[in-house]
Image (spheres, grey):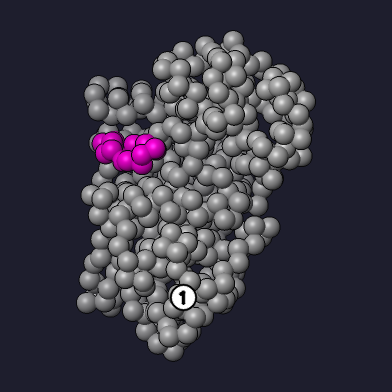
Amino acid sequence: MATEGPATRRVRVAEHPRLMKLKEMFNSKFGSIPKFYVRAPGRVNIIGEHIDYCGYSVLPMAVEQDMLIAVEPVETQTLQLANTNPLYPDFSTNANNIQIDKTKPLWHNYFLCGFKGIQEHFGLSNLTGMNCLVDGNIPPSSGLSSSSALVCCAGLVTVTVLGMNLSKVELAEICAKSERYIGTEGGGMDQSISFLAEEGTAKLIEFSPLRATDVKLPSGAVFVIANSCVEMNKAATSHFNIRVMECRLAAKLLAKYKGLQWDKILRLEEVQAKLGVSLEEMLGIVEDALHPEPYSPEEVCRCLVISLQELRTQVLSPNTQDVLIFKLYQRAKHVYSEAARVLQFKKICEEAPDNTVQLLGDLMNQSHVSCRDMYECSCPELDQLVDICRKFGAQGSRLTGAGWGGCTVSIVPADKLSSFLANVHEAYYQRSHRNLTFEKQSLFATKPGGGALVFLEA
């Protein structure tokens, strides 16, 4: 249940090779053994891209890849973080003086986001320190939410050390808010699925209030993740936050056009809710109210009857001050059409007609076209990979995650899976000599995994 906290399981560490290896590394690093372990999964978003921060529902599932942290509370106030991957250097700081540098999305800052989020939620000022060893097997910057999984894992670690109780929903909301310490203006999908996921089912995640509904995926198909091997770090690039701002501006212009109090409106969903119309009707209003040509900051000001100074101080975020063009029509078209596709996807899963897999594939294909052409969050490698996946048997394929790199997700009939994997591997990975340390994880079938957990040694 979402009202309960994440489950705690007793395990025999010796029977779990990954936990055993983590325990041994922890011992050689800190000279002691962990008190407990926490895991939080990554996710694949099946459909509903770039709409959570606009207020709309999304349809992700957790993957089995996760962040795993071994933890030992200590008497001092020092927070010591280490990573099993030598690429990520050790870090230590005072637990009561957490500084998060937005200019550098270093790995430990994501841990600090989760830690600080819990600290601030409870208003705590005298926290005990801890030793933590982090082990992640989610490919980084791949659109499978490795950074949010680390934030969630750190939040759950902190709550567990403090002996506090929070529900999965509360944890998801705190972690979604706290990831903004690093400058990512996300919408909360990644943290929600990391806590609310259940094995065997995808979830429709709705916001305000946050809730999750099971979506049973068709048994005759498999979802396959393929990594384009192009890395994109949301916190290090401005694309993501510019899209968030374009959606906000589009919402304000649509609200002004319809005579609503635009200055209070932040999300495209709020415009629809206030007007009490359907998503299809909103698409018509976009056609009437916005033009396909990009808007300059000056034109936005003319539409809203405000000064450039007011636009910069009251509307734009600090990292979008210097943007010269805003594609408001295209972004709003994507969001309203993608929100409708999510609801259609869920409805098809529930009704389960004979051609379910084909219908779901069509929606995924439409989603990719919209992400590519209207939201412009694809890249040539993702487009190539999507084409290859469709060529070799996927009924539908699309980019997943923020885009500009990362992964695709494809729906593949179960009887075509082995030939699909072999052909895509040859066509995309071998021919282009994409030689990866994460080679095994570049292309894999996945099924819905469970959410965040605490492990105690039995």
Apparent side of residue 220 relative to residue 59 in the rendered image (left or right)? left
Q: Nearer the viewer, residue 355 or 42?
A: 42
Identify the amino acid type marked 1: Asn
Image quarter where the C terminus lies is bottom left
- Region in magenta: 203-217
In the depicted structure, whether residue 422 falls above or below residue 248: below
Residue at horizontal 71 percent and vertical 33 percent from the top: 311
Residue at horizontal 25 percent and vertical 61 percent from the top: 7
Residue at horizontal 41 percent and vertical 63 percent from the top: 122
Q: Position of residue 354 (x, y in %)?
A: 25, 22
Q: Secondary structure at mark 1?
A: loop
Q: Nearer the viewer, residue 262 or 164?
A: 262
In the depicted structure, whether residue 390 falls above or below residue 240: above
Q: Position of residue 228 (x, y in %)?
A: 56, 45
Q: Pointer 1: what residue? A: 126
Give the crowd class for mark 1: few <14, some 14-19, many >=20 residues within 10 Å: few
Apparent side of residue 5 relative to residue 151 in the rendered image (left or right)? left
Residue 319 falls in which quadrant of the image?
top right
Q: Position of residue 234 (x, y in %)?
A: 60, 48
Please identify the residue farthest to the bottom as the structure is shown.
31
Q: Nearer the viewer, residue 301 or 417?
A: 301
71 within the magenta span: no
Does the magenta stretch mainly form a helix, a strand or a loop?
strand
Q: Nearer the viewer, residue 446 or 150?
A: 150
Q: Position of residue 217 (x, y in %)?
A: 29, 36
Residue at horizontal 36 percent and vertical 71 percent from the top: 162
Q: Is residue 412 visible?
A: yes
